[in-house]
Every structure is written in structure tokens, then in C-alpha cells.
Amino acid sequence: MLRAERVSKRYGRVLALDAVSIDVRRAECVALIGESGSGKTTLLRCFNRLVDPDDGRVLVDGVEAAELDPIALRRRIGYVPQDGGLLPHWRVRRNVELVPWLRRMQNSQEPAERALALVGLEPAIFADRWPRELSGGQRQRVAVARALAASPDVILLDEPFGALDAITRADLQIAFDGIRRELKISALLVTHDLSEAFLLADRIVVMRQGRVEQEASPTELRQDPATEYVRQLLLRARVLAA
Amino acid sequence: MNRLVGLFGSLALLAGVSIPAGAQNPPARRIVVASKPFGESYLLAEMFAQLLEARHFTVDRRLGLGATEIAFRALRTNAIDVYPEYTGTGLLAILGERPSPDPRQVFRQVAREFRERYGVRWLPPLGFQNTYAIAVRRETAQRLKLATLSDLARVSPTLSAGLTPDFIGRADGLPGLAKAYGVRFGSVRALLPAVKYQALAAREVDVIDGYSTDGFIARYDLVVLQDDQHFFPPYEAAALVGPAFQRDSPSAVSVLTELSGLLTETDMRRLNRRIEVDGIPIPRVAAAALLSLGLTRDVPLGTRPTKDASRGGVFPYLWSQRSTIMSLTLRHLLLVGVSLAGAIAVALPLGLALERGRGAAESVIRGVGVLQTLPSIALLAFMIPLLGIGVVPALVALFLYSLYPILRNTYTGVRDAAPEAVGAAWALGMTPGQVLRYVRLPLAAPVIMAGIRTAAVINVGTATLAAFIGAGGLGDPIAAGLALSDTRMILSGALPAALLALLVDAVLGASERLVTPGR
């Protein structure tokens, strides 16, 4: 569904991505993990052309992204940023209707309400609220609903639950996982939270200084860290017993 | 966003109020009579105006123009036709020549040089001199045995002086006085004409510069020290006539010469006292003077004594002036509204454009900010050679002052508007135009409105200075009141201006809340 082939990106003297290749298959969730500055967000942003790579190829559903109109591409791909990024001057309903409206879909209200219900927010109660009238967890649910409203095949998530408290985060992770599996949506998830990656992802890509350190299923990763760096990372996150 | 547009629409509507007075086509050429901002200048200009009107000429009054610089520039460029000036001022302040003690010779010199250099004509002098009068309290004169300026020089280090800024800087002022008499004051404070007499009476200062024909000298019982070394040049008052006026209306110019030689110093002191001490309105004093000089047969309507007491409380006075205040307020609002609407029309798109091309932004905004640092009076004076005097240069100056707050707030407001919301809107497929229209502008609207509000409130205050270039508005009574030391008159401009500022602030504050998203 998503594929990067030897993608490089340089910011001034910093090589943010160094010939990175990854692959997200249909209905699969891949987590990108790594420290700040490892290049995981830059890689994520290549797929909806918020970042255009200097070198290599990015493919979305088999088509080279560089050939696609970036605006149309973004409207096809769901996106959930860390802070929700709700438009504060729009009510919940209008926020969730954003992508259907941008895509000039005939009826944007119905998919919006369906998406709200999907993330566990009763439209009758929440649709007419302002974002500031919601809790952090509810805001993030709205952000997920907004990403899902236009029924995308693929969704990008940039540390979507990082700013939430542990209990709310766990609730949302479980809810999101259920929805994704039910709707068979492909997802690329950037996170620094290893337990989140282990919970949600079918495969995990560990990044370090713009390169892929290891790519494996959660089980493989736990059993067989490819490098000392990965082993330390797992140890620190207490995914691996010392 | 729609609210924002609607608001701008109503501002533009406000700006579209018809321009009062002087817009209709005149049957004959209107003669623009002006004065500088002090009592005697107002009075002489009013006498010029009434005399011309008595001879059936149509007159526009532009009284209280900034000072010598502004009035003379306006005359040279035919923005005004005539104003009263003094030969000594012409010689020293305008020509920059050395002083000379002989009045005849000074007049001949200024008459010749003004004609050759500027095409400006001095009519034969009015008959009296008004020179600088260095004055002290009677008690000071007696205690220190002061009669002459030489006496003053002797004790000057123990005295503090309160002098007009003009006098402190001019060659025929303090620097010359120091050279001629060796005067060295213990301290020198710059005081406006309106407050220096009060400061002297209140013993804040010991010595001031006055004019020899001032009514205040009698009002405060001051002693004028004799210029025993004849330092001050002769300041003969005369009508100064601009180039176009001489060409277009020779008959009107000759009417003005009827006043030549008719006014003595005693006359002027008496007339000035009626204005400055008795508080009688200038038009009435001028009308009575022309009548007693035999130049008119009747006192024109509107200058006859009215029932309301000329002295009295502030509020009865304000009430009696209500129709004047109302029309001045409308004119003021017009100045503020039009200049603000223009500034919004320029600064808002410019701010948005700069946000797109941020490289140039800071330098452009700083450049506009430099305009803000120009003193208002200086900016107004710069306008005269380009735009003359009156409403247009005032509008341009106010427009320039309004740009910065609106530009700065538009730029930073749009730039800093909720970055995470902008990022999400972008990532979900909004076009740059949609991001601006649906996200950045609405989120920046309160900040932009705050900039407009700042500009408007500053504008209401700055517009009072427009009186100094003849644009009218609430500055008119403030300038005249300052010149005449008439607190009620000052308040009749200052109070409505302050209320207007509060009102504008409140209205725009309310619209700021109106455009605040997600209330």
C-alpha cells in the first residue's frame, strides 16, 4: 500500500533519511520507532508529500507519489497529528466533515457522524461542541474520526496518543486497533512508545540516524534484537527483561 | 471571516460620509486667510477675513497653522493666500539674515528678498511692532532692582527661565541674547506659550519670553525689561501675501492695504487683552475693531454679543458650543475613518503577502515602523510642499501612522495562528488559499482587529494635530485654546476627542470579541 525505496532527504548538512526502504502492506499496521531525530516523522511525511525526498521513490498504492497532485493525495490519506490539530474555530461536526467537504462528497454529514460514532463519541452529544469544550482524549478521538471520515484506505499517525494520560491512551489504542482491523485500513504509525508499537503494529521498523536499524514483527524483535542499539532500546522500555 | 468583511464594509461606509464645507463650486475665487497659533495672529487674520467679507469677497479661514515653518510653506505654495507675519521673523527665521535695528531698513530688505526669492509680497506694515518682551514678576523686578536686560544679565545665574522652544533655538532668541547681554540663566525650561505665564505666576520659573503686545502681561501684572542695547530686531506686523493671490485678486489685495498703518501698539495691547484677559470671542473683537477703525459700517451677523456669558463653567460653555463640537467631531471622525480605511486596505493585503514571502517581511515592517517614529508635526510639515495644507495631507499623514500597527498585527497574527491547526489543515489536503481563508485569517482575526483598534485609537489622538495644517477637527479648539490660554476652549476639543477615543476603543473592542473564533 505504501512503499519507500531508498529514500533520502537532507536538511542542510543533516541527512534526515539515508536510503531508507520500507513497505506497508494492505490492511497492515507498521510502526516506526526511534529516538527524536531518527527520521521517523520525516519518512512518514514523505507519503502525503508534506516532504518531498531528494532521492529514491515513494509509492502509494503502486503509483509514484511524485506523479500525484499533492493536494488530491492528502485528501485520500488519513492523518492524525500528535496534538489533534483540530481547527479551534470550527465545531466538532465541521472538523470531522473537513475531508469529505474538501473532496466535495455529496453528503458529508453522514460519514462524519458515522466516524464520530466509530470512535465512541455520540454525535448527538458531541457534534455541536467546540474543540475547547472537549477533554484531551475526546479531542484526539475527534482527530481520529476526522482522519477516518472520508473512508481512506491508508492512514498516517504521528505520535497520535503521545500527549494523553496512560489510562486514556490505553482506551484509545484499543479503540483505534479495533476500528483499523475492522475496516482493514493500512496504517503507518510513528511513535516513541514501544509498548504502543507492540500493541498496535503488525511490524516494527526501528530507525536510527536516518537509517533502518531493524525491521521485524513484534515477536521477532523481542526475541532477536538485531543490534546492541535495539537491545538497549527494548531494555529501557522494559519490553525486554534485563 | 464574513464578519470581518462586514466590519470593513461598515468602516468604509463611515468613511464615505460626505465632506462638509467648501465642496461646492465657488462663484468667485475663495481667498484663504490663515494665521499662526497665537492670539494676536488669530485676531489679525480674523480682521483680514472680515474686512474682505465686508467688501464681498468669499473667504476660507485656516486659522492656527502649526508655526512659521508651516504657515510660510503653505503661503509659498499657494495653499493659503494671506497670513499676518512680522518683519523680524521674516528676516531672521525665514531668510536667516542677521538682525538690524532699523525698522524701515528691515522692511525694505524683507520686501525685496521675499519678492525675489519666493514671489511673496509684504503689504505695508499695519502700524505696530510686536517684539519679544522678556518679562519677570513685579515682585522679582523690585527685589532685584531689574529694569533692563543688562540688569537681568547681572543676576541671571540665580534665575530660572521658562522659554518657548522657538525662542530657545532662534538666533534672535536665547543664543543671541546670551551673546549680546551675557545672559546665563541658572536653568532653562522649554514651555509652551499657553503655560509659560501660569508657570511664571506660580513661581515655577522667574523669567519668560513674551510678546510686547500680549494681553497676558497686564493680566499677570508683569514687568517687561527694557532692551537697552537694542538687541531684538523690529518686528513690524504686516500682511504677507502669496504669489497666486496677487495675480488672481489684485482688488482683494488692495482691500487688505486699507489696514496698513492703522493699528498702534496701544490698540493691539487693548485688543489682545480683550481676547486673552476678558475672554471675548475673537470674531467679536475683530468686528468691533474694524468698526471703530471706520473700515466697516456694521458688525457682521454671528459676531454680535450673545446671551451666554463669555465667562462661566466648563459645562455651560461646552453646551453653548454643542453644534460646533458636533460638526468638529464629525470632521474628526471623517479624518480618522478615511485614513484608517485606507490603511486597512493597504496594510492587510501587504501583511498577508509578507507572510507568504517571509524573507522580506521584517525589513518591510521595520521600514514602515520608521514612519511611526517621525514626530507628527514634522510629518505634517513634510506634507505641505507635496500636498499643500488641509484635509488631504492630514489624511495621508494619519494613513501612514495607521499602517504599522495593522501591518505588524496582520503579519504576526497570520504567521503565529495556531500552528498545529494549520499543520493539520495542510496535511489533510487544504490548498494554500483554503488554509489562508478558512484557518489562518479567522484565527488571526482577533489579532488583526487588535491592530486596527490600536491604529484607530492612536489616530483619534494624532488627528487633533491636523489642526496645525488646517484640516479642522477637534484639534481646532485645542490649538486655539492653547494659543489663548483658554482652558474651556481646550477642553471643548480635548474632552470630545478623549470620549471619541474611548468610544472607538469600545466599539472596536466589541468587534474584536465578535471575530474571536470558537467563543
Image: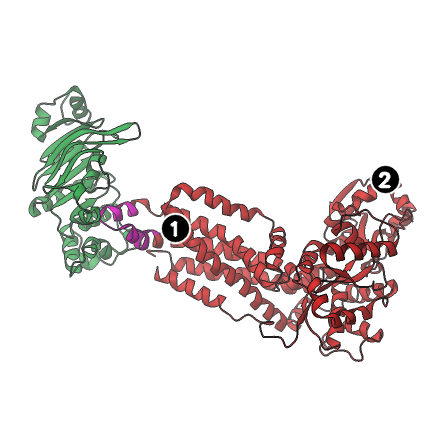
Chain colours: A green, B red
The answer to whether any part of residue A88 appears in the image is no
* Disc 2 to disc 1, C-alpha distance: 61 Å
Task: Tell whether position B425 is magenta.
Answer: yes
Q: Tell me the magenta residue range.
A: B421-440
Q: Say which of A147 and B359 sits in front.
A: B359
Q: Main secondary structure of the magenta part?
A: helix
Q: Earlier in the sequence, mark 2 or mark 1?
A: 2
Q: Position of residue B246 (x, y in %)?
A: 73, 66
Most foreground residue, A194 or B21:
B21
Answer left or right for B291 relative to A117: right
| Residue tagged 1 | B352
Q: Nearer the viewer, residue A151 or B62?
A: B62
Host chain of mark 2:
B
Q: Nearer the viewer, mark 2 or mark 1?
A: 1
Q: Are marks 2 and 1 on the same chain?
A: yes
Report the amino acid beneath label 1: Leu
The image quarter in which residue A51 lies: top left
The answer to whether B413 is drawn above or below residue A201 in the figure is: below
Is residue A20 located in the magenta-colored stretch of the structure?
Answer: no
Type of amino acid at the residue the image marks with label 2: Gly
Judging depth in this view, the residue of B383 and B446 nearest the camera is: B383
Please tell me in which quadrant of the rendered image residue B513 appears: bottom left
Classify mark 2: residues with Cα within 10 Å, few (<14), some (14-19) or many (20+): some
Query: The C terminus of chain A is located in which quarter?
Result: top left
Q: Residue B296: x percent and y percent? A: 80, 77
Cβ atoms at labels 2 and 1 below 8 Å apart: no
Q: Is residue A232 visible?
A: yes
Residue linked to disc 2: B182
SS of the residue under disc 2: loop
